[in-house]
Structures are given as structure tokens and as C-alpha cells.
Image (tube, helix red, strand yellow):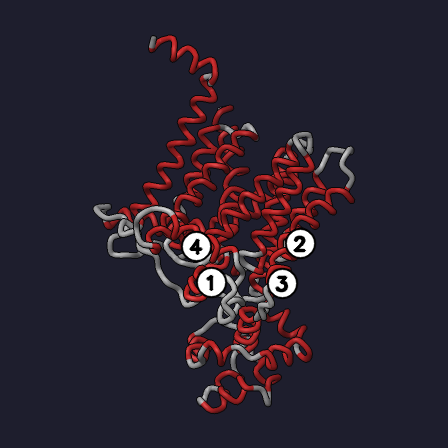
Amino acid sequence: MLSNSLKVFFRIFNLKQFRLFILSTILFLQIYLIGIWSNPSLNSILAPDSYDYLTLAGNLFNENANFRPPAYPVFLWISSLIGNIESAKNIFLMQLTLHALTIYICFLFLNYLKINVVLAYIICLIAGINPSQLYHISNIVPEMLLCSIITICWVLSLFFIYNSGNFLPIPVLILIGIISGVAALTKPVWLLGIFPILISILLLNNNKKISPQKISTLLIGAHFSIIFFWNGINYIKNVPLQRGKTLTVNICMASIRSGLIKYGEGTAIHEQLRKNGNLKQALLLNGEDNQNFRNIYASLSWEQRYDPQFANCILQNAKLEFTVSQLKYWHYFFINRMFSPNKKDSFIKFPEVGKRLYVVLYSYFYRPLMPALLILSIIIMIFKKKYRPLLLTSLAILVYFSIVIIMFSKSQSSVMRMRVPVEIILFICTLYPTMDLLKNYLYKK
């Protein structure tokens, strides 16, 4: 009877599919268990802005915190409903599960592209146990949720491109737009994120039956319909939204770091710096994220950093200076290293030399290897057509995301956190072409 059951099983799943199922399951469990090992207490860390998200998780229309977008508070609320342990532990486990599931989806997709199964496994494992990702899984901030949403949006976009829109093209395009809209409601950095996806699909789409106009309408329409739907709910409920508060703070702090406080004479933040004795020091800042800027930053409360009048002065009188000062640090998005799990019980019973090697190897991968491999991937793409769809789509997202982050980040050090949402894409598009070519070369030898 058992042998008959096995025969039926193998008819349903041929050996190749069964192997893929086993490997993908092992990958998921590996990432999940290593994630638990990195934080065995399952505790979540509160960042300064975590309190706003937790406030909204209790009341999505709370006027004191509604300058934060709604998707992550909804995620926090859902996590509080699952399981019998306290909410903070639920948040960690939910974020870890979502991260492992995202890597699982990436692995299946790479196999859909007929990438060598072992190579796909290695790439996904390297991306999945990245210290930066494991560190942020335990933080109550929206970066890891946004990472999963953007990565799934990226996978669906590539799926549409690779099958030439032959599989349910309209539902797939609408789904991409909806997921992209949810990403925009997770963090405003993705507000225009549908456009790099749209550009890559328009450039790479081989299905002549679907017009560019139709693709554009479906993607942009679905993306912004989600955003308008949320705005409509707030309008119906007559909720006064505090729009752009975080963006205003970032513009103010970035302007001070760039030495542009001279344009803010008469504003509240200029007066505050004069009162606390930091004005002269602020006038000497030149854009570097140094100790002088950090001292000034620390001397201001959150409310003091929020000065719409000063932000408007910069945008009206120093727009070019602000833009140049920010973009000259664009490369920091690709060369900054990362945070790593550093709790006392992280990787318990793992030799200290092993912990240090784990962090050091990834640190050196982030810098200098990752920027070099990204440049190499671009060169490979020019000469090898098979890599173009994946790399062009990845680069479109990375260029958009990195420019927006650098333009509106208060400091270069904050990029380590802000880069998290696209790190899985960054790992895959830097590792895959080089490792694939190396595998082919060794195989021929």
C-alpha cells in the first residue's frame, strides 16, 4: 500500500519538482531558524519612530501620529492577533516569516528562469542571512515589510517580462500596481516607485497584443487607486492628515548638514541654534556626516527639527545647492556597510571567531565587493542578452530608490537603514551574473 502511495506521489511530482520542493523548504527553514538564532529571546527593538506606528496600530486615525503611512500599523495590528505570545514577539516572528517567505519566492522564481538550482540556492541563502536583514527583522520599523513588498513587486514584474505577458497579463499588471500602491502606503519613498517598473516593462515587453498605453493605464491606475482609496477614507472620516512631517524634518536636517542654515535667518530653527550656541558651528558644516553635525542634531528635539518655514526657504532659495549637496553623496547608498545582530544572546554557543567572521565577510562584501560586482554586472549585461531583463529591471528600481533616499536623507549614516527595502534585489543582481558566468567557465574546464 505504501509503495502504491509513493508511485502516485511521484506521478504528481516528478523527481526534479520534488527536489525543488525539498530545497525550497530547506531554504525557508534555514533562514527562519538562523533568524531565530540571531534573536533567541524573540524581542523586538523600539526605534524612536516605532511609537508612532504602534499608536496607529491601536487607532489608525490617531491625529498625533497619522503623518506615518498606514500599511505598517495594519501589519502590527495583524501580528498582535496571531499566536499566544506578547505582541513584541509576534512582530519579530511575523517579520521573520515574511522575510523567509520572500526569499522562498525569489528562489522559486530563479528556478523559473532556469538558473542552476544550486546556484539559485546559494544566492538566496546569502541574501537571506544577510546581517542587515536579520538586524532589522527585530526592529519595529517598516523597512522589512517594505522590502518584502518591493521584492514581490519586482518578481511579478520580471515574471510578466519573461513570459511576454502571455499568462493572465491584465490581472498580473493590476496586481503589480496594487502591490506597488501598498508599498507607497508603507513608506512614501515608493510614492513614484511604479514608474521605474513601468519603464522596464515598456522597454522589455515582447507582447505586441498589449499596447504601451494599456500597460501604463493598468499599472499607474492600480498604483494610485490604492493611495487615493486611503486618502478617500480619511476624507470621509474627516481626519486632518499631517502630511510630509518626516520629509520636512529630513529636509531641515540635511540642509543644516550642508551648511545651508544661512538661508534660514528668521526661522524657528535658526533662532533655536542661535540660542543653544550651535549657530556658528552649523554655518561651517559642509555636508559631511561628522561629529559636529551629530552634536547639532542631538541638541534639537523632534519638534524643533520640524520647521516648515525653514524647509520652504531652502526649496525657494537654495534648491540647486541642496540638490547638489545631497546627490554628491549618492555613492554612499552602495558603499555603506551594515548593522548586524548584536544582542548578548545573538548566535548563542556559536564561537566568537565565527560571529566575527560572519560580520566581517558581509562587511567586506558590502564594501568594496558589492559596488564592484554591480559595475561588473552592468558590463556583463551589455555583452550578454540573457541577463538584461533581470538587471535592467533591478537597476531601474535601484536608481530610483537610491536617488530618492539620498536626496531626502538627513545623513549618510541613515542610508544603512533606508537601503534595507532593496537589499534582496541588490544582492541578487550583483551575485547572479558573475556567479553564473563563473559556474559556466568552471563547468567547461
Q: Are marks 1 and 4 in contact (CB under 8 Å)?
A: no
Q: Secondary structure at mark 4?
A: helix
C-alpha separation, residue under disc 1 versus residue under disc 2 = 24 Å
- Determine whether, in the image, residue 210 is placed left or right of residue 269: right
Upstream in sequence: badge 3 or badge 2: 2
C-alpha separation, residue under disc 3 versus residue under disc 4 = 22 Å
Q: Quadrant of the N terminus?
A: top left
Q: Residue at x 46, y 76 (%)?
A: 302
C-alpha separation, residue under disc 3 versus residue under disc 2 = 18 Å
- Residue corresponding to mark 3: 236
- Residue corresponding to mark 2: 224
Instruction: State which quadrant residue 203 falls in.
Output: top right
Residue 136, image x, y percentages: 40, 55
Upstream in sequence: badge 3 or badge 1: 1
- Residue corresponding to mark 4: 77
Can residue 228 be seen here? The reply is yes
Q: Residue at x 47, y 64 (%)?
A: 414
Residue 341, image x, y percentages: 33, 54
Q: Residue at x 58, y 43 (%)?
A: 154
The correct choice, above or below, for 393 with respect to 116 in the image is below
- Residue corresponding to mark 1: 59
Instruction: State which quadrant residue 167 falls in.
Output: top right
Callout 1 amino acid: Asn
Upstream in sequence: badge 1 or badge 4: 1
Q: Are marks 3 and 4 in contact (CB under 8 Å)?
A: no
Query: Tag 4: Cα neighbours inside 10 Å, few (<14), some, or many (≥20)?
Result: many
In the depicted view, which residue is nearer to us: 182 or 399?
182
Q: Secondary structure at mark 1?
A: loop
C-alpha separation, residue under disc 3 versus residue under disc 1 = 16 Å
Q: Are marks 2 and 4 in contact (CB under 8 Å)?
A: no
Q: Name the front one of labels 1 and 2.
A: 1
Callout 3 amino acid: Ile
